[in-house]
Every structure is written in structure tokens, then in C-alpha cells.
Image: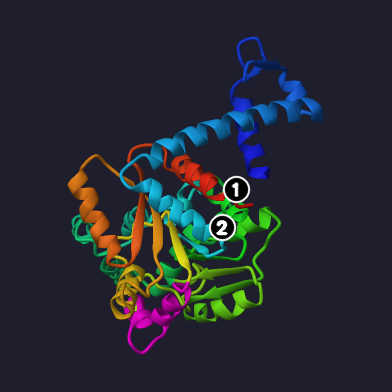
Amino acid sequence: MKFLKDDFLEQVSASIDVNGDIDIEGVKFSPNRILTDDDEAFDLAFAAWCDTKEEERLSKVDEILQLHDNADRFNTLKQSYARGSVTPFVGAGLSIPSGYPGWTSYLYQLRKETTVSEAELDAFISNGEYEEAAQALFEAMPPDAFDEHLENKFDTKDEQLSGCVRYLPHCFTSSVITTNFDGVLKRCYDAFQTPFDEELLGADAIELPKLLGRNKNVLVKLHGKANTARSRVLTKAEYDAHYGAATNLGDCIQAIAGKTLLFLGCSLSSDRTVKCLQKIHDESGAAAAVRHYTFIPIGDDNDERLRRRDELVKANIFPIWYPEGEDHDECLMALLSKLVEGAK
């Protein structure tokens, strides 16, 4: 895959030894042979590198699946994936390696363009009031300035794609759901030469089941795009408007929740989507609701892990844990590789 070759060449360029040679799995190559037109040398070196990476990922995922109750839960998810019943739900965590800020980081960047004090923003964040924080920042600057800042951060950037998000087109070929404003997913699928047939914004996501019935490859941007305030969901007022009783974004989430969702790069705390899934779960009952999953980091505090599990299960989301503090991207890549193994 192209993105693996990009990673390989990056490592090759950084690993030239004092003699000017490159040591790949015990085989010496000259940079000229690998980095120019010697296809045979490149293929040999690349194959050796890929084999080592695969071994590392298998070792990593074996360690992860031994944690807590991961193994049985992962096997159930893998069975759903093999049936084509899993849809990825992508959060900001998967765009961060490509140079985009996470939501907390972005709010602190935006604060510098307002009169909102750092202490005020700290209070919102510590209470998990992200919608309220965005609302306060929105009200502290002209709407056009707010829109321009958001667009510059998430729409006009053309950073090199990085991280495990580049692997998604290999894993999922029917639809992807995201609350992100950026264009990372579209660029990934374009680069993989499997562009999306359709892009749905906000409440239009209710059309997803119909499009999937036509075998369409669909990108659902549930909270809209950075370059337009239409269908955008970021501030408290926008959340209330789009998730309120008079609108149907909640109905859209019910429509997309008809298949198993796999949350990737999502914090899943203080989240309206999670609250909608809780409502669906409460109304349909545990026996009828489709189970969803997330790959999520956890520390060593077992009481905190159980508390977190209990919160997620209220929304019928079941966690597959990986160690907090380790390379998030490598852990996610290992889990995705294992998910795909034998199913393609």
C-alpha cells in the first residue's frame, strides 16, 4: 500500500549509517539503490521491512488482546466485520497526526482571538462543557471572524497525511461517519483510489441506508464542514438547534446505528452522539439494540476502567482497551490489522 511505502521511505532516509549504507533487517543497501530506480532492490528492502512491521503489530495486538476482557469482545467484533456489518465512526484523534488540532487544543488556540480568559476556558473544559466553551468563544468575536478562523484551521490545510487513518480505505469500503470538519478522510480515500460516491452533511445522514442499498461509498460528515455554517454543529446553540426535538439529527444517528459502529479516535465523553445512542438503547432495550465498539486507551486504575466501561455500556458501546501512554497510532493500526486479517 502506498502509505506504507511512504513510511518506509521516510525511515530509509533517516537511517543511513556512518558509512552511507542502509541496514534493513540485516541486509545492507546503498541509498542510491533504494531511493532511485532500482525496483528489485526497493522491492526486496520494502518486503523485508513490511514483514518486520507485521510481526511487530501481531506481537502488539496479542499483548492488547490479553488485557481485561478484550479477546472475546474483539472476536465478536471481528465476526461482525467479516459479515460487512461494521461502520467506522471517526473522531478528531485520527486527524491529529496529519497536523490538525484536537478539540481542546483548538479551543485554546481560538481563545487567544477573544476576550475570554484562560481561567474561564479552563473552567468549561474541566467540567466537560465543550459546547458551552465553543459558544462563549463564538459570542466573544464577530461571527465572520469565528467562521474564518475555523475554516483556516480545518479546511485550507493540506498537510501530509499521517497515521493509521490512511489504513481505513483498506479496511472499510462502504461508508465512514465522522464528526470532524477537516478533509482528511476524503483525501485518504482519494489517495487510495476509492473516492466516496456521496458526501452527506448533518441531517442528510438519514439518507445513508438508502445509499448503502445502492452500494454507494458514502462519507457522512455528521457535524458539517469547516467552510460553511450550514449544517455545522460546534457551539451550544448549534448543538441545540440540530439535536433538538424539532430537528432530525437524532433520527440520523438512529439510522446509522442500525449497523455496528466502531468508534476510532473518539473520546466519547460529554458527547451528544453518545447521549443519542443512550436514548436509542433505553427505548429499544438491550436485547434489540445493535452493539457498538470502541478502541480506547486506559491507564492502570481498574476502578476508573470499570467506571468508564459502565458509562459507555449505557450507550451500548463496548470498549476494547489499549494501554494509555503507548503510541496510539501503533495500537490502533495493530488492532485494525488484526480486524482485517482473514476477512479480505
Q: Secondary structure at mark 2?
A: helix
Q: Are marks 1 and 2 in contact (CB under 8 Å)?
A: yes
The foreground one among 269 and 95 is: 269
Left or right? Give the position of 314 relative to 83.
left
Quadrant in which the N terminus is drawn: top right
Residue 82 is tagged as 2
Say if residue 101 shows up in the picture. no
Q: Residue 71 magenta-drawn?
A: no
Q: Which residues are magenta?
A: 238-258
Q: Residue at x 46, y 56 (%)?
A: 77
228 sits to left or right of 143? right
Q: Residue at x 30, y 80 (%)?
A: 283
How packed mark 1 is, by other alpha carbons closer than 10 Å (few <14, some 14-19, many 20 or more), is few
Residue 124 in sight: yes
Q: Is residue 140 placed above or below 43 in the rendered structure?
A: below
Residue position marked by numbered label 1 in the rendering: 342
**Residue 91: percent from the left, percent from the top?**
43, 58
Vertical position of residue 153 compared to residue 325: above or below: below
User: Residue drawn 62% across and 61% down?
Assistant: 173
Q: Please give the label number shown on residue 288.
A: none
Identify which amino acid the numbered label 2 is placed on: Ala
